[in-house]
Amino acid sequence: MNTQKSLLLILRNPSFAGSNNRDTLDIALGCSVFDIPVSLLFLNDAVFQLLNNQESQVIEQKDLSPTLKALDMYDIQDHYILEKDLQRYQLEDEALLLNCKTLTDSQLALFIRQFDIVINL
Amino acid sequence: MNTQKSLLLILRNPSFAGSNNRDTLDIALGCSVFDIPVSLLFLNDAVFQLLNNQESQVIEQKDLSPTLKALDMYDIQDHYILEKDLQRYQLEDEALLLNCKTLTDSQLALFIRQFDIVINL
Amino acid sequence: MPTTTKTTLHIINKTTTNARLYQDCCDSMLEGDELLLIESAVYAGCEQNFHSAIPTSFPIYALEVDVAARGLTDKLNKEIQLIDDNQFVNLCCIHHKSISWF
Amino acid sequence: MPTTTKTTLHIINKTTTNARLYQDCCDSMLEGDELLLIESAVYAGCEQNFHSAIPTSFPIYALEVDVAARGLTDKLNKEIQLIDDNQFVNLCCIHHKSISWF
Amino acid sequence: MIFSILLYASQSSAQSEQSALRFTRSALQQGHKIHRVFFYGESVNAISSFKVTPRDEVDITDQWLLLAQKADIDLVVCIAAAVRRGILDTQEAQRHEKKSANIKEGFNLSGLGQLADAIIQSDRLITFGN
Amino acid sequence: MIFSILLYASQSSAQSEQSALRFTRSALQQGHKIHRVFFYGESVNAISSFKVTPRDEVDITDQWLLLAQKADIDLVVCIAAAVRRGILDTQEAQRHEKKSANIKEGFNLSGLGQLADAIIQSDRLITFGN
């Protein structure tokens, strides 16, 4: 079966910085409909997307948190973040929008190796 | 006289990286027609635009060197680069497309202060 | 107008992941200049190593709506002064010119 | 297919001014992976501090046309192997997947 | 004071256009004059009349038009940047034999001279870009 | 081998589209198959039929069409990304009551399912972006 290919989507942008985040989440939803198993890695500034209490309406930007919360309904439940990104921005004790697994620096490369396709917008 | 306002254009991109460089040079030409005195600062990766022997045709991109060489005809003759950028890329002894004055790190801020308008695309 | 009064408002709108942008911006600052963080730049205010991420000793402001939009109101370093849009316009009036770093 | 053969071709196209991009890319590399510099990334090959700018010990290639277009043919660090478009395609075949860093 | 705004966004969906709009509103409220907003580079893509903005998002171009009418702001789109990206007024559409114009009504195609003029006529030029 | 290409350029004038084209040409020359090129994000702006490319520059979209005809490549433009940026085919232009289509003939608007399909059908997906 072709559809056994696994897909990793890497997000690297903070909230409201261009359409990359939205476009990546749309790929996640689109691919899961085709039964492609999808994982998400929130790398670098992308951890900021996962903060609670964002008020996108005060700057009239699109709020992605409903889309993030909808991932679960599409059976997209594998979310990853890096320990060093949480440390850099002092977010270790923060409650995030998604339930993420934390990777150390040294786990990153081995983690990425297991996937068949990586899209990194 | 309003037109005594001096304009500094900061370029920060290498060759062929989007339209920022071309757009900045077009501003230079457009403003000099209105007798606005224009200076150019090639900051950071922008020093690469000044290399000789670029062969833009092999990647079918627009060659900006004719525009750079035309600046002189528009009386745009004040070009600046940073010593540290030349060092970083080992270009200290390189013959560049434009005759540039070299600024040290510590001269940069005082240099910028003298201008009335700065456009930094 | 003497050169010494020609101060600049520096406006930056990217995260400190663009370290060289912050370096270039801060290297361009002189006594009297001020730095305003807008859009994604407000995240810089939650850096663990705040002073190495924004290498300047001059005053730093952040745009209030951009901080609120990103859920950072309680997380920002206390050395950063929050300002509203009116104060942003006012800073542009006070300084002789502005430079946008993006 | 065993995990160990699922190597990756990493493709990067920005200058090392984007230091964090290089860090993330190189942190993602494992034994067997290779790095290809295209477009603006070929400038990385003239860095004075080449090894700190591209923090990897794995093989590094650069796309010949992009090097020539930028006038860098004589300036590139000798540790970088120049390849043509056909070899680029070939690298994509050899490796199980590619990751583009931009 | 007299302000002009230079818009240079590279992504149609980034925040800089919205920041520029808020700045403009705030300056007007404080009694300042906005002489001109100059759309340059990729920012010209935002001025397409063919855009269909999703219902849960805001089309900022409409808000520029409202402000411009109230406060007599000149909304100029760089003609060279626009034509190369396929944003055309009626005259350019005819000249280049394209089927129709697609620039939003109320925005004017003009040259870089309008940016030079903005520099000369304004006390401050503020750039919003990304 | 079967390749598909994902194009995700944020600046209409950056080099990534040209890199993708050269890669495609080279892959075809070596006997590989290019199943699909998927234009996503800001890359859709490049597909405007209203663009007027300066004489000393190359319009890459024409070269995609030539290659696609010769080698039976499916050129797909993400419909959601296109419509929100004002790149419309006849059907979308009618649906949204715009004066005309402005997508270059030979490129097809379609959904993200075509990217999922490309992932399933191809041995390799190569992203070109900036």
Image (cartoon, coloured by chain):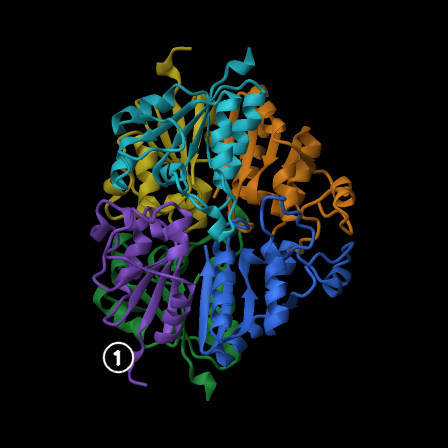
Chain colours: A green, B cyan, C yellow, D purple, E orange, F blue
The answer to which of B21 and E37 lies nearer the viewer is B21
Q: Could you tell me which secondary element the residue under label 1 belongs to?
A: helix
Residue C54 place in picture, x, y as percent = 29, 39
Location of residue B103 with respect to A96 vertically, above or below: above
Q: State which chain disc 1 sits on.
A: D
Left or right, E46 with reference to B55: right
Lateral position of residue B60 relative to residue C45, left or right: right
Name the residue tied to disc 1.
D4
The answer to whether E59 is drawn above or below residue B51 in the figure is below
User: Residue A109's spot in the image, x, y percent?
Assistant: 27, 69
Which residue is found at the position 29% from the left and 29% from the top?
C58
Residue E21 visible in the current orientation: yes
Point out residue A64 in the picture as x, y percentages from the top left corner. 49, 60
Split into 4 quadrants, where in the image is the N terminus of chain E? top right
State the image quarter where residue A92 is shown: bottom left
On the image, the x and y values in percent for residue B111 come to: 34, 22
Which image quadrant is residue B47 in? top left
Instruction: Please give left or right for residue C8 compared with residue E57 in the image.
Output: left
In front of the other: B93 or A16: B93
Residue at point 49% right, 40% down? B20
Q: Is residue E123 above or below residue D16?
A: above
Q: Residues within 10 Å of mark 1 (few under 14, many from 20)?
A: few
Which residue: 71% across, 44% down? E88
